[in-house]
């Protein structure tokens, strides 16, 4: 049976990667047709804009042609489609803690992408060093919090761990000189182990 869902996709997007990891972990990859796109804020994609007015990926077109967008929404959708243990706790304090950790990981990714845009896409004479430093400070604060929470990430591979692993993978991919492992040894040890999971190996971005 052919896939009935279409995921607007780029293999280097850390937000798309979160969705792909969950699909691998829950055995749902075969349900999805991958529609590859390349886009930046100054190079939008018409197909994406048609389905997601924000012009961002991932976007997921369902069988009825309706579209979900934002990785957190799509993760929640797919987490309700499998019969295994939920990767997003359904209720209680654990739900809010794991979603908060996932949100912090997304903040790392957001800041890293803004640094990437400022230092790679923006013309050199228009770059704002203080802006980059501000984003790097966000990353540093978030990583310090994850260093304290490394034991929590190790409890289970769920939305928090997926989001943190994808954020750290993006730092290694786009900010290889950051050397975050020096100041976060517990987080580095966790990531060294978790990054060997088949779902993360299969979705690792390549230059």
Image (cartoon, rainbow, N blue to C red):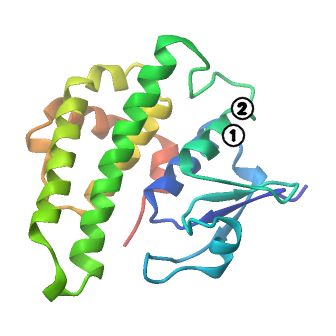
Q: Position of residue 52 (x, y in %)?
A: 64, 64
Which residue is at a point 40% across and 48% down the rendered structure image?
166
Compute the Cα span from label 1 to label 2.
Answer: 5 Å
Secondary structure category for the residue under label 1: helix
Secondary structure category for the residue under label 2: loop
Residue 17: in sight, yes or no?
yes
Question: Which residue, as the protein is rendered here, is positioned at the far top?
Answer: 92
Residue 196: in sight, yes or no?
no
Q: Are marks 1 and 2 in contact (CB under 8 Å)?
A: yes
**Which residue is at the front of the view, 122 or 173?**
122
Q: Position of residue 96 (x, y in %)?
A: 47, 21
Return the mark for residue 80: 2
- The residue beneath circle 1 is 77
Q: Residues within 10 Å of mark 1 (few under 14, many from 20)?
A: few
Q: Position of residue 132 (x, y in %)?
A: 16, 64
Which residue is at a point 18% across and 84% down the rendered structure image?
126
Answer with left or right where residue 78 lies relative to residue 55. Answer: right
Q: Position of residue 186 (x, y in %)?
A: 19, 29
Which residue is at a point 42% across and 35% down the rendered structure image?
102
């Amino acid at each position: 049976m052919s896939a009935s869902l279409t995921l607007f996709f780029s293999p280097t997007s850390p937000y798309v990667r979160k969705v792909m990891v969950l699909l691998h972990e829950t055995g749902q990859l075969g349900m999805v047709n991958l529609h590859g796109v390349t886009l930046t804020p100054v190079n939008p994609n018409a197909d994406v804009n048609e389905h997601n007015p924000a012009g961002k990926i991932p976007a997921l077109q369902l069988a009825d042609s309706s579209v979900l967008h934002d990785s957190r929404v799509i993760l929640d959708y797919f987490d309700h489609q499998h019969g295994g243990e939920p990767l997003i706790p359904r209720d209680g304090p654990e739900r809010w803690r794991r979603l908060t950790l996932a949100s912090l990981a997304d903040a790392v990714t957001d800041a890293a992408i803004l640094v990437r845009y400022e230092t790679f896409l923006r013309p050199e004479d228009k770059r704002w060093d203080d802006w980059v430093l501000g984003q790097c400070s966000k990353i540093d604060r978030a990583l310090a919090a994850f260093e304290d929470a490394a034991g929590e990430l190790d409890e289970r591979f769920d939305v928090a761990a997926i989001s943190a692993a994808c954020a750290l993978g993006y730092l290694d991919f786009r900010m290889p000189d950051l050397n975050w492992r020096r100041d976060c040894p517990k987080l580095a040890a966790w990531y060294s182990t978790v990054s060997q999971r088949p779902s993360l190996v299969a979705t690792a971005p390549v230059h």
